[in-house]
Image (tube, rainbow, N blue to C red):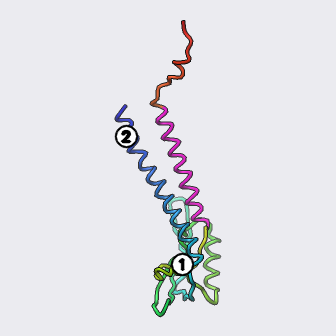
Amino acid sequence: MKSQVGGFVLFISLFYLIGFGLLGYGLWSARRSTQAAAWPTTPATITSLEVRENSHSDDTTYEVKVRYTYTVEGVAFEGSRLAFGYGGSSDREAHDEIRRRLKEAKAVAVRYDPANPAVSCLSYGLHRTILFVLVFSVTWLLFVIGFTLLFSLSFRSDAVLLDNLSVQ
C-alpha cells in the first residue's frame, strides 16, 4: 500500500506542476498585459508581418508573427511581441484580421515598459488566449484535486458503516 501511495504522489505531482505552471503563466500574462495599458507609446515601423500556419497531426493553428522597430529617447529597439500571452489558435480569420489591420495601418504605436524600454507590445488587455489559459489551468487543477481526493478515499476504511451497523 505504501508503494502505491508513493507512486501516486510522484505521478500526481507532475500534474500539479503542469497545472500550477500554466496558472502562473496565465496570471503573469494577465498582469503584464493589463499593465501595458498604462505604458507610454511611441511610433513603430513594422519590418515583418505574417500569419504563420502550424500544422499538427490533426489540427492546424495560426499565429501572427510580427517584428517592429521603435525609438525611445534616441535609442533604437526591435520588438516582436503582439501582446503578452498571445498565442495561436485554429481561428484563422481572427489572425488574418490582425495581420490585415497592421498591414493597412498608416501608423502603429508600440507600448513600452518605461522601466525597461526593450520590453514592448502592440496590443494589451485580457484577450482570448490569456482567458483560455486561465480557465484551462483552473479546470485542470480542479480535476487533479478531485482525482487526488478520489484516490485518497479509496484507501480509507469505511468506519461509518461499521459504527452504524446494528447487530445482536
Q: Residue at x 49, y 33 (%)?
A: 153
Residue 103, quarter of picture: bottom right
Judging depth in this view, the residue of 105 and 59 nearest the camera is 105
Dot 2 lies on which element?
helix
Work out whether mark 1 precedes mark 2 in sequence or the reverse, and give the earlier one. Answer: 2
The disc labelled 2 sits on which kind of residue?
Gly
Dot 1 lies on which element?
strand
Q: Quadrant of the N terminus?
A: top left
Compared to 107, does 138 lie above or below? above
Residue numbers of the magenta segment: 127-153
Q: What residue is disc 2 on?
A: 7
Judging depth in this view, the residue of 54 and 78 nearest the camera is 78
Q: Quadrant of the C terminus?
A: top right
Provide residue 140's location: percent of width, then percent of height.
53, 51
The disc labelled 1 sits on which kind of residue?
Cys
Compared to 5, does 12 lie above or below? below
Q: What residue is disc 1 on?
A: 121
Judge from the rendering whether residue 16 lies leftward or rightward of residue 1; answer left or right.
Answer: right
Judge from the rendering whether residue 155 lies leftward or rightward of residue 39; answer left or right.
Answer: left
Magenta span contains residue 141 = yes
Instruction: Check contact, mark 1 vs mark 2: CB within 8 A.
Output: no
Residue 53, quarter of picture: bottom right
Residue 3, quarter of picture: top left
Q: Residue at x 35, y 33 (%)?
A: 2
| Pair 1/2: label in front | 1
Q: Residue at x 56, y 69 (%)?
A: 62
Tag 2: Cα neighbours inside 10 Å, few (<14), some, or many (≥20)?
few
